[in-house]
Image: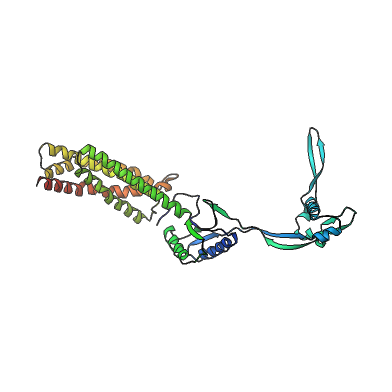
Amino acid sequence: MLGDLEGNPTPIEVKVFGDDASVLAGLGDQMEAMLGKVSGVVDIVGVQKGNPEQTWKIDPTAAGHLGITVEDVTQQISAAWLGEVATDYLALDRSIPVRVRYPDAVRFDPGRLGETVVRGPDGKSAPISALATVVPESGQTVLNRENLRQMVLVSGRLEGRDLGTAVSEITAKLRATKLPVGYTWEVGGQYLAQRQAFRELLQVLAIASALVFVILVVHFREFGVPVLILGAAPLSLAGALLALIMTGTELNVSSAMGLVLLIGLVVKNGIVLLDYADQERERGMPALVAVFDAARVRLRPILMTTLCTLFGLVPLALGLGAGAELQRPLALAVIGGLTLSTLITLYLIPAMYAGLYRRARA
């Protein structure tokens, strides 16, 4: 199960890009219906369409019978419904404009718009319904742009389902949908943000491993021992993932940060053990004897530092304290990985160290 710590993007977002606004609006309705059939996707928000409108088309001939033009009719309607400033009211040192218009009881009733009286210069008058015809319309659809491309956005939340499987099902349905030529779709939201976050964390993990390897090579002045020490890191990741699975915790940005942290913690135990083994081997001891002696002497420091780290993370792993839930996956990943890596450091690495120098001596 994959999650994400970012709270601003909607979990599910389907974007459709194209040029024609009317075609995009129809495709947006199609995507909204498609998301409604996906299990676990709730609170779907589709294309935001405009409110119902009434467009009055004024007949120039009918307006001319009153001796006025279409523009005169428009100005009179605007003055009646929106109002116009007739005078100013002087109050001490301020001038307050006085706007004259129809009362709100009339202005807020669209059905009474046709009763608005329009007057000509000679005193003749007629209701607007006698000069124009009404055409019901809907307002313009709300469209967005991304990277200068026009798009419609359909979003939804998840309930009782993980993000990975939901996006996989939505992607399969989108691939089976035929769009007009020139129109494309894209899945965004937390899914896109999550992929970018994990991609960047993998880069950080690779850089951290490379830097640690360089430091180990400089310290031990060879490549064999650094490879042995750093080789325990991938195995410790298995312990971290196992801890997450056993506790039902999501693999998210916090737990991925714990995996990066494990690189340094795992290497520390290996350095403490094999540095002493190298010192013993330089004194003339066989590699097998040297590494066993190092395991015996450095057992207490390794266990003490490891246990201090584990016990320090226990309150965080239990979710104790305000805000601890956010970093609980990190603590669980470090506890699982460090526990397994300690066993690997004490049992597997000494055996591989002895075998490495036995082959080198042979």
Check the image and report above or below for 177 versus 308.
Answer: below
Residue 153 drawn at (x, y percent): 54, 57
Check the image and report above or below for 180 versus 69.
Answer: below
Residue 183 drawn at (x, y percent): 51, 61
Colouring mode (rainbow / by chain / secondary structure / one colour): rainbow
Q: Residue at horizontal 44%, vertical 64%?
A: 172
Residue 274 drawn at (x, y percent): 19, 41
Q: Is residue 74 left or right of residue 181?
A: right
Q: Residue at horizontal 48%, vertical 54%?
A: 189
The foreground one among 279 and 102 is 102
- Outermost residue, right direction? 122
Residue 318 visible, this orientation: no
The foreground one among 200 and 65 is 65
The foreground one among 180 and 145 is 180
Q: Residue at horizontal 22%, vertical 37%?
A: 219
- Outermost residue, top direction? 93
Q: Quadrant of residue 161?
A: bottom left
Q: Quadrant of residue 316?
A: top left
The foreground one among 94 and 72 is 72
